[in-house]
Amino acid sequence: MRASSFEGRMRAGECYHALRLPPSAWVVLRVDGHGFTRFTADRFEKPFDATFHEHMTDVARALLERFQGAYAYTESDEVSLLLPRDWALFDREVEKAVSLSAALASAAFATACGAVAWFDSRAWVGSRGEDVVDYFRWRQADAGRCALNGWCYWTLRKGGMGPAEATAALHGKSSAFKHDLLHRRGVNFARVPAWQRRGTGLWWERYEKEGFDPVRGLAVKAARRRIRVDRDLPMKEEYGRRLARLIDDDARREA
Ligand SMILES: Nc1nc2c(ncn2[C@@H]2O[C@H](COP(=O)(O)OP(=O)(O)O)[C@@H](O)[C@H]2O)c(=O)[nH]1
Ligand SMILES: [Mg+2]
């Protein structure tokens, strides 16, 4: 057997390796905690736990840094990471982007939490800036819906209902009904922390760092960037405008 033909035949079995993210497309990598319904059950407060959300924010920060992302958004057990359009890490290989984002999320979460947890990952691809705005508004709407449901479900459970009874009491009910249900039990949903209803966003911001040049004996200013974390995001159209500005910045940087 010729070594080179053997090598070639084995390499041919790596049939997904040539897959690349389309050039210049917007890409969002979304990691999601695997089996987190069970994982969180005895470890964290229901429906929301500030420590759990901080662990997820640590995951988002790690992804933004290591992948040099443009924006990260976390809600529940997921993080969406927007990549700059000219993103060139790992030669834009899909397998690398998906597997390494899941691996990094798992490692960052396990380090923060002190327990083994694993994440899956998928790639979303959009061609226009408007698609990206829609994507993040979609995830934020999901956060709002899940927060309202979670608050209702756990308020009923803590009030003495069993799982099936609480699920049946909410089945097919409108959002107005759910707000009212909470209100009657002393919870004003509009007042629960914004991160629970809207998620948390992270992005790079520029700032000037004061320094001292010992050679010239002068105070100097240097441009730096750092990660900004917003746990009180705007919503709907205003959130869309915020995202549109972020995308514009990315386009300007590329130009
Ligand atoms: N206890 C707790 N659970 C949470 C929190 N945030 C998200 N979760 C749970 O994480 C799960 C996320 O949903 P999903 O990904 O569909 O479930 P999975 O397939 O079991 O990972 C839900 O069961 C949520 O209740 C939190 O702050 N506290
Ligand atoms: Mg999950």
Image (tube, rainbow, N blue to C red):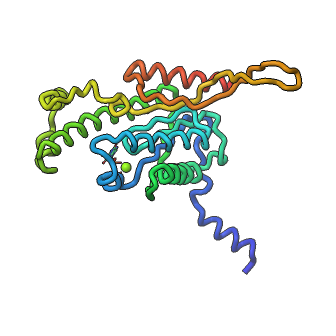
8 with respect to 21 (left or right):
right
146 with respect to 111 (left or right):
left
Q: Which residue shows up at 68% across the image and 27% down it?
A: 224
Confirm whether residue 171 shows in the render. Answer: no
85 with respect to 111 (left or right):
right
The outermost residue toward the bottom is: 1
Q: Residue 203 at what x, y percent from top left?
A: 54, 30
Q: Residue 156 at what x, y percent from top left?
A: 15, 41
Quadrant holding the C terminus: top right
The residue nearer to you, when weighing 154 against 7, is: 154
Quadrant holding the N terminus: bottom right
The residue nearer to you, when weighing 214 against 154, is: 214
Vertical arrangement, residue 44 with respect to residue 25, above or below = below
User: Which quarter of the figure has residue 248?
Assistant: top right
The residue nearer to you, when weighing 27 against 221, is: 221
Confirm whether residue 19 shows in the render. Answer: yes
205 with respect to 178 (left or right):
right
Q: Residue 158 at what x, y percent from top left?
A: 17, 44
Q: Residue 226 at what x, y percent from top left?
A: 61, 30
Q: Which residue shows up at 34% across the image and 34% down it?
A: 196
